[in-house]
Amino acid sequence: MTEFDRFELRLPALLDDLAIAQMPEYADDLLARTAATRQRPGWTFLERWIPMSALTQRFAASPRLAWRLGVALALLVAAAIIGVIAAGTFAPHRPAPFGPASNGQIVFLDGSGRILAGDPVTGKSTVIVKAPGNSRVTYSLDGSRLAFLRKGNAGEFDLMISDADGSHERRITSTPIAAPKFMAWSPRSDGIVMTDSAGTLLLFDATKAAEPTSLSQKLGVGPVAIGYDGFQDRTLNAFRPPSGDQLLFVTHDGGARLQTARLDGSGVQTLLDPKTSGLGYSNLKGAQWSPDGSRIVVQVEFPLQSERWHLYVLDADGRNVHPLGSLSTDPLVDEGIATWSPNGTRIGFQYWTNHADGAGQDFHPVAVVDVASGHYRDVGRTSPNGMVSWEWSPDGLSILQVPGDGSGEVLIINVDTGKMTTAPWTVAEPINWQRTLP
């Protein structure tokens, strides 16, 4: 028989021959050299600085998201803080005192003299000053505050200030005022300018109760008149835009002169003088700056037309005096209570037409004239007794009217379409529309 050569019997010997020796022949030399060399310090190895948890975390059976979520939240908070800081740095919180703005609340009084704020969109109203006996409430030009008069037991008035929502009410007159006339906020909302029955020009600090500063004394001017003796004061630009550093007024010492001056008592200038202007007028009133401060509109009375006023426009330096429009040259027309639109392109005013035989007058709604062309159109309702108050909306698209017909209605009229909306409130005192950020 043939004998088989069984391979598995020789396999152990073959594996011993193929196996790599566990100790290389040069091991003795290697150990001799390393024994004479100093070991390198552990701190020189960068990987020793890294916690082992950071190396092993990637091998965790489930992801650990807590620290990532914390970092994300921290970044969101930082972004929010940066956004708030940027908004406070680059964006105004209140509208500029002059020019177009957005329409806010409408402030008015009820029968007891409490102050209410009404939303012209929803019609809802809220009592914001509960104390009675208030009058002549008006927003500051930036819409942030309110000024109003409160009648005392002796018939005199305290000048009151509050935030726009009626909070933080405070009195700023140390002595009551007997008969206040013109009253308006300064452009920075830090003061109230007022004239009294003697024609003294006063400046009140809106931050505290104190005696007012007599601007008449500082400016060296005689009896002063601003606006319309207390009517429509809230609508007048008595301070020159855009900086508000000049006050416009009429003095009555030696004739009605149209003048400007700074509140620090410097820079008194005469723009119109009956002796030198060549206009031949006998009286002036109701002067106010255009929203850009480049022009002035003023009511002018002439000697042969007593008690009939006409509207004239002039440049800020007193030059280029001319009638506002065609009605201003009609001797039978009596114009007054002029107010610039917020963008300065139009002027609204009231007017009456006297009969040629002197037997009566025709009454008209508020007229709106395009300053560039002189063309005008009537807006709103005719009221034989004029208006309790009227003014432009802050955005310049509408006119707010309270007719003097005893109805107490509050009308909002679109100037371009003539569409009239009646607010759900009734009033007996002048009202005012708050300016807010566009």
Image (cartoon, helix red, strand yellow):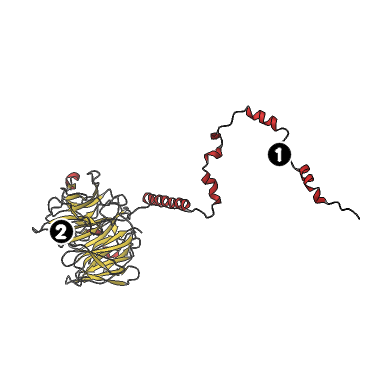
- Is residue 258 visible from the viewing direction of this image? no
Residue sitting nearer the eye, 6 or 41: 6
Q: What is the C-alpha distance between the residues marked 2 and 1?
A: 108 Å
Q: State the residue in front, 2 or 370.
A: 2
Determine which quarter of the picture holds residue 128.
bottom left
Residue 12: where, in percent of width, then height?
77, 46
**Left or right position of 311 against 438:** left
Indicate the quadrant containing the C terminus: top left, top right, bottom left or bottom right: bottom left
Quadrant of the rendering where the N terminus is positioned: bottom right
Three-letter code, disc 2: Arg
Query: Which one is nearer the viewer's eye here, 286 or 89?
Result: 89
**Which residue is rendered at x = 82% and y = 51% of the image?**
7
Q: Can residue 98 be seen in the rendering of this structure?
A: yes
Residue 22 image label: 1
Q: Nearer the viewer, residue 55 or 187?
A: 55
Neighbour tally class for label 1: few under 14, some 14-19, many 20 plus, Cα within 10 Å: few
Is residue 215 left or right of 324 when viewed as pictured? left
Residue behind mark 2: 150
